[in-house]
Image (spheres, rainbow, N blue to C red):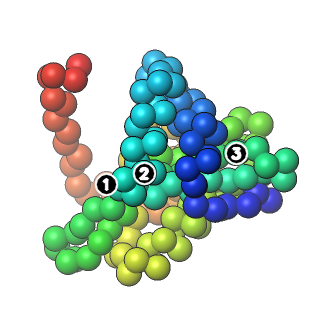
Amino acid sequence: MAKIRKAIVSDINGVVDLFDKYRVFYEKKSDKVKAEKFVSERLLQNDSQIFVAESESKKLAGFVQLYPLFSSTRMQRLWLLNDLYVEPGFRGKGISKQLIEIAKELCAETNSCGLVLETAKTNTVGNQLYPKVGFSLDTEHNYYSWDNPMFK
């Protein structure tokens, strides 16, 4: 069982390593320099919540990153569970479930109406995990996105 805790500034190098591997999982190029800048800004500006899973050997085994949103129809805060990653050597030990539970606790502590997430249809592990931990697949709504051509 891993120890789950809020990430602190001294965790940046470990979180950056996990974050970079997470991005590679989603077929992005590895870029630890930009990853460090991005993760550092999130932590220092406190505009996301990052929780880490620490193994018994004090190695960071995984992380979850959440961003605050608001639901106009519910008139409450809503959290976007944007990033969830566990190192391959630590998978199958319930760490993802622990990280999701801490996200649910954050939701309760901040009087938020829920969590939302998106994952690739090809993410078979995630698509099996999320219903097991209480998430419902939205089959009634369309999801659209627009990419700024300046960043392609």
Q: What's under tag 3, amino acid-wise?
A: Leu
Left or right: 5 as drawn, with respect to 110:
right
Q: Nearer the viewer, mark 2 or mark 1?
A: 2
Kindly report the distance in space between the C-alpha atoms of the residues bearing marks 3 and 2.
19 Å
Q: Of the residues under marks 3 and 2, which one precedes in the sequence? A: 2
Which residue lies at the image location 16% right of the left edge and 71% below the top edge?
72
Relative side of 102 to 27, left or right: right
Mark 2 and mark 1: Cα distance apart in space: 37 Å
Q: Which residue is mark 2?
A: 44
In the rendered image, the vertical position of residue 23 relative to residue 116, given as above or below:
above
Q: Is residue 59 left or right of residue 52?
A: right
Q: Nearer the viewer, mark 3 or mark 2?
A: 2
Can residue 66 be seen? no
Q: In the rendered image, which residue does mark 1 sit on?
A: 139
The answer to whether the residues at label 2 and label 1 have Cβ atoms under 8 Å apart is no
Q: Is residue 14 above or below residue 65?
A: above
For the residue pair 88 and 64, the one nearer the viewer reads as 64
> Outermost residue, right direction?
57
Disc 1 residue type (three-letter): Thr
- Going 57% across and 54% down the picture, which residue do you hit? 8
